[in-house]
Amino acid sequence: MLIDNHNRVLNYLRLAVTDRCNLRCNYCMPSEGINFVKNDQLLSIAELKRVASLSVAQGIDKIRITGGEPFVRKDVMELMRYMSALDGLNDISITTNATLIGPHIDELKALGIKNINVSLDAIDKATFERITRRPHYDTVHENLIRLITEGFNVRINFIVLEGQNEQDILSILEVMRHYPVSVRFLEEMPFNGGSKQFEHIKWNYKAIFEHIKERYPDIKKLVSPVTSTSINYQIKGHQSTFGIIPSFSRTFCGSCNRLRITATGDIITCLYGKPKANLRDLLRQSSDDEVVKKLLQQTVSNRAKTGFEAQQEHQAVFDSSMTSIGG
């Protein structure tokens, strides 16, 4: 079992399979993109399988596959098949922009992988394409509806961006009111590859809630797991629910149960902190699983208590891109 120095049990791994993405969302990276790493610096599928297996052996029972965009990696389904057969792994989920998932939906369903987070920051086509800098709205919408109608547990992640998509907050709730989905609004985070610097945000979790409540006053707060990053609600008459994630305000740090491993093997114990160790060279140099497990335990044993504390570790945190961190 992985237990940190604040007595928090870590049972949730966010495992990135690539740093590449086929969109160029303006809150994530500059328009010209970032310097993606060479393929030989990425963890291979065999190495990702080993990381998954060893993590589960240490008490991880939930793995979320992230990127970049996971389905940019053409061999990602090999990893999915492997993980679906891992004893002790109770929850496999994926975060995707839904541009490339279409050909894999049937197999994902057959494997029992049904928890899908779709990054969608606008319900209006023009706004979507302005934010993503790519003309893929129709594909995303088609795949999203297919996931919903075929019974996947879909959560839509919508980052609220000042001056860009505020007008879509209420619109997406109205469109999704007839579907069993959760629309989750996230505060904007500063991981944009250095394309923007900011210390404060207009659309914090309180402002988002008040904006929604003004339009929909009959809102019920839902009971959420203690480790949930979102504060969850349901509007009367809506089949859907909505949540608000204080990703910039970081109100949930005290119950954080997450560990991140990037596509290059960096171990990140807090989104706002520096990588604490790297697994890639160790995986390639040693076949001793106990050595790898020991590094994981040692790394989580020196973990910041909050994201604000972790942020003090370096001055250049805002130069990072979410696609390289791993979501």
Image (spheres, grey):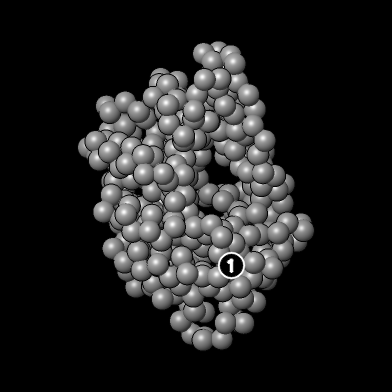
Query: Which of the pair 286/107 is nearer the observer?
Result: 107
Q: Position of residue 112 (x, y in %)?
A: 44, 57
Residue lying at 49% horizontally and 30% vertically, measured from the top left:
240
**Residue 248 shows in this picture:** no
Query: Which of the pair 115/212 is nearer the observer?
Result: 115
Q: Position of residue 107 (x, y in %)?
A: 33, 59
**Residue 241 shows in this picture:** yes
Residue lying at 64% horizontally and 66% vertically, measured from the top left:
59
Hey, which quadrant is residue 89 in on the image? bottom right
Query: Which of the pair 241/54 is nearer the observer?
Result: 241
Residue designated by label 1: 88
Q: Position of residue 280 (x, y in %)?
A: 47, 74
Amino acid type shown at disc 1: Gly
Residue lying at 55% horizontally and 13% vertically, measured from the top left:
214
Residue lying at 52% horizontally and 50% vertically, measured from the top left:
316
Horizontal side of 209 relative to 45 (left or right) equals right
Relative to 20, say whether 249 is above or below.
Answer: above
Hey, which quadrant is residue 206 in on the image? top right
* SS state under label 1: loop
Q: Quadrant of the N terminus?
A: bottom right
Relative to 276, say whether 313 is above or below.
Answer: above
